[in-house]
Image (spheres, rainbow, N blue to C red):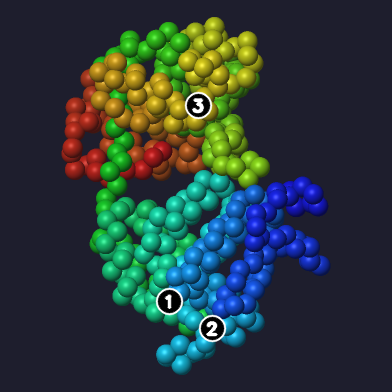
Amino acid sequence: MGRAGSEPKPPRGVTIRDLKDGQRLQIAFSYKGEECRELLPPGRITKSYIDYAAGLRAEIRRKIKDGVFSYRAYFPESPRAARLDPADDGGRPGGKILLGAMLKRQKALYEKQAENGTLSASTLLGYDKAIRIYLLPRWENTPLDELTPSMLREWIAGMGVTSKSVRNRLTPLRSVLDDAVNDELLESNPLNRIALKKLIKQTAKKSEYVVDPFDMDEVAALLNAARSDERPMIQFWLRAGPRPGEMLAMPWTGTDWVHGRMRIEDNMVTGMVDGKVQQVIKKPKTEAGVRDVDLDADAMAALQAQKAYTFLADGRIWHDPRKNAPWESEAQFRKSLWQPLCKRAGVRYRNPYQLRHTYASTLLTAGANPYWVASQLGHVDVEMVFKIYGKFIPRNYQKAGAFARDSHGEEESLKGASVKA
């Protein structure tokens, strides 16, 4: 895309202009009896950007029809803004800049960054959700210069979500307000005038996620209930402990049959391909993520059993047995295999990540060196092992592989174990 003749055809009212500094999208609309044409910010001409331009034009036309359109809010640098928007009752020139317009521009910027590869697709999805679902419904029609710290403080205090969710929602808003300060539209960022850390600590909801591994009876029930084409995957996962994305991306070429190891160097994540969000296979984020996991006899037996199903395909190890094709996503595995298996086994449902937690907890309970466990899990250091799994190691256990008696209880000591490894 971006070359003559290769870009998508724009709809009515949207034009691709060839300028000296490159191609730009332009939208056209009528306002106060005048034909207006405005250039959008520079960016790669993609289908998603053209769709955004068409949606922006439709939104502007709707607001013009409803009598609530502010030229300055959408095109503050346009010469038409001062001419077509008269002074308001407060004596300030033109209409007020609405926070909603700035948030939509920020959303378009994120989309362009994802297209250019400077922003991951999963991060884009998070920002898009924050803007569309949480920020625009509350702040779309709020004039920028009327946003106060007290308004933000009340909104944040009433969210009723975890501290991570609060910060995720605030990230796009903070970017918009920082830009407004840099553009001299605001004297200061109102978020900076809030004791945010203290406010979040006082009002945020505690995370409901807990490390809740399967005990030995549940492990046996899961393996007994698994069909022959399902059991190898579950058995291997329990004995090797990869992250879900690592498990689904695992190729046969990573198997060291001589030394009994599996090279982990691929991860299935949400990515951007040809402007579309989909699952892609990438390298781990950290150097520690690339590792050789030692495999015990049960893990090697699982691989041997899986050979009958996927080895000749010479690709990924773990396939959806119903489709005889590699798993497309964790969601697909969870819905078509994992949830039905838990139900058949009579095991209380937990997400697939608990298979990894079971692996780590079992090793530590049996007396494995925490530093070695950290290396097997792909952690940068041992800190996360002690933080997440330390409380699951019984002080006085009598048999290897047995969890502490209260490891599945609601003891106060477990309430802090709320971070995914």
Q: Which mark is residue 85?
A: 2
Quadrant in which residue 220 is drawn: top left
Task: Locate residue 278, reporting x and y percent.
Answer: 56, 38
Give the mark count.
3
Outermost residue, front side: 33
Residue found 28% across the figure and 43% down from its top: 208
Residue at image coords 49%, 65%: 62
Give the amino acid at mark 1. Pro
Contact flag, marks 3 and 1 (Cβ < 8 Å): no
Give residue 143's mark.
1
Camera-nearest residue between 43 and 242 = 43
Residue 400 visible to an observer of this rendering: no
Nearest to viewer (mark 2 / mark 1): 2
> Between 268 and 18, which is closer to the camera in this rendering?
18
Q: Are marks 2 and 1 in contact (CB under 8 Å)?
A: no
Percent x, y of residue 86: 52, 87
Position above or below: 291 against 18: above
First in residue order: circle 3 vs circle 2: 2
Across and down, in percent, residue 304 comes to: 52, 8
* Badge 3 amino acid: Met
Query: Residue 139's x, y, as percent?
Result: 39, 67
* Residue 327 horizontal side relative to residue 49, left or right: left
Q: Residue at x 50, y 30 (%)?
A: 329
The residue at which mark 3 appears reads as: 247
